[in-house]
Amino acid sequence: MVFKGTESRSAEDIACAIDAIGGHLDAFTTKESIAFTAKVLDEKLPAALDILADMMLRPAFRLDDLEKEKSVVLEELKMDEDNPDYLIHDLFSHGCWPDHALGRPIIGSKETIESFDQAKLRGFFSRTFQPSNMMVTAAGNLRHEQLVELVAERFADLQPGAPRAADPVPRHHASISLRDKPSLEQVHLCLGVGAHSMADSRRFAGYVLSTLLGGGYSSRLFLKIRERLGLAYSVFSDLSLYADTGCLSVYAGTSLESLEQVIECVLAEFRDLKANPVSDEELRRAKDHLKGSLALSLESTSSRMSNLARQEKYFKRNYSLDEVTGQIELVKASEINELASEWFHGERVALAVLGDLQGFQVDHGALSC
């Protein structure tokens, strides 16, 4: 709705203004953040901040625009329902945190989308968009002092608000979620366990563990499930960390006939990581893959800008690439084993399965690790 117009600009005015300076506007929402971004030539920074500040401080939230946008988002919701890769992760998150916002899809539901009105939108906006809850980050050919001056000038009208109430700490659930969708050719699964928060010092060991488990072409799950057994085309692990919780998950797309075997392959690797130390060669390969991926991910100004924001949000400081890679280098095989021994227990394993299940059932007894 912020893109639909402000008190002084229409949606067309915003589009023309950013095009006139050869720039690009975008926005995205994660589980814990809302971001509005602009990418422009360095000399157009003041003009870009003018546009962004107007959008973020003075959105119009016109009723006719709201009704049209609700229809657009409902179509996006249908698109997500048709995308099993997206849907399985929403199903898994809901099973992990059924009583918390982390377990809800970012886009909402048909009921919540249809319930939005001007009052709800303005209420959320006034509670959320206030100085104590906002940050500005930038990357590129700029001077920090100039950026501070421009932001202070453009956002001078932003008034302090009441402090936001702290959200309840989410509790991870080891749920089993099965959703039958006969129209799908594949069965999609997510299997995982609760993990630590983003700021936990063990995060580097956690990322190395996830990498050697399913983070590359030489990872254990890729080699075993795809290359040796031919049970899946796509299989990978992911460590998702948030302000006060986290989750290690494994995704795979397979056939109904291979589903139980794929689940057992994942659980077997969980058991092995607990029982046996990681070899020096495998640890070296995982560290190098992780460091290389991290360095390549920071090659654009947009990714550097996002990384600055993420670090400020969770750590209140900026970790250089050398610092991060140095911490990755310090990870020991014994730390991988300790994390695996803490995380991988049958009573902690959550599972979500989506597809033409034809009566497939599974209980926690089959998830022992």
Image: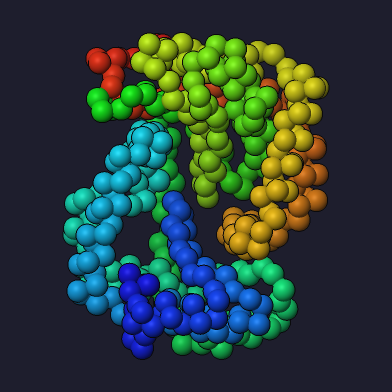
Residue 156 shows in the view:
yes
| Left or right for 83, reference 320 | left
Q: Is residue 29 above or below residue 262?
A: below
Q: Residue at x 72, y 73 (%)?
A: 141
Q: Give the image location of residue 358, x and y in percent.
A: 25, 16
Q: Is residue 220 above or below residue 52?
A: above
Residue 308 shows in the view:
no
| Left or right for 14, reference 249 | left
| Left or right for 230, reference 65 | right
Q: Residue at x 43, y 57 (%)?
A: 29
Q: Is residue 10 above or below residue 252?
A: below
From the viewer's side, name the closer residue of 109 and 227: 227
Q: Give the image location of residue 223, x and y in percent.
A: 62, 19
Q: Give the image location of residue 207, x and y in percent.
A: 65, 36
Q: Residue at x 39, y 17 (%)?
A: 255
Q: Where's the N terminus, which quadrant?
A: bottom left
| Left or right for 146, reference 107 | right
Q: Is residue 120 above or below residue 10?
A: above
Q: Quadrant of residue 340?
A: top right
Instruction: Describe the colour scheme in one phrase.
Output: rainbow
Q: Give the image location of residue 317, x and y in percent.
A: 68, 61
Q: Residue at x 53, y 14 (%)?
A: 230
Query: So how many labels did they put on this image?
Result: 0
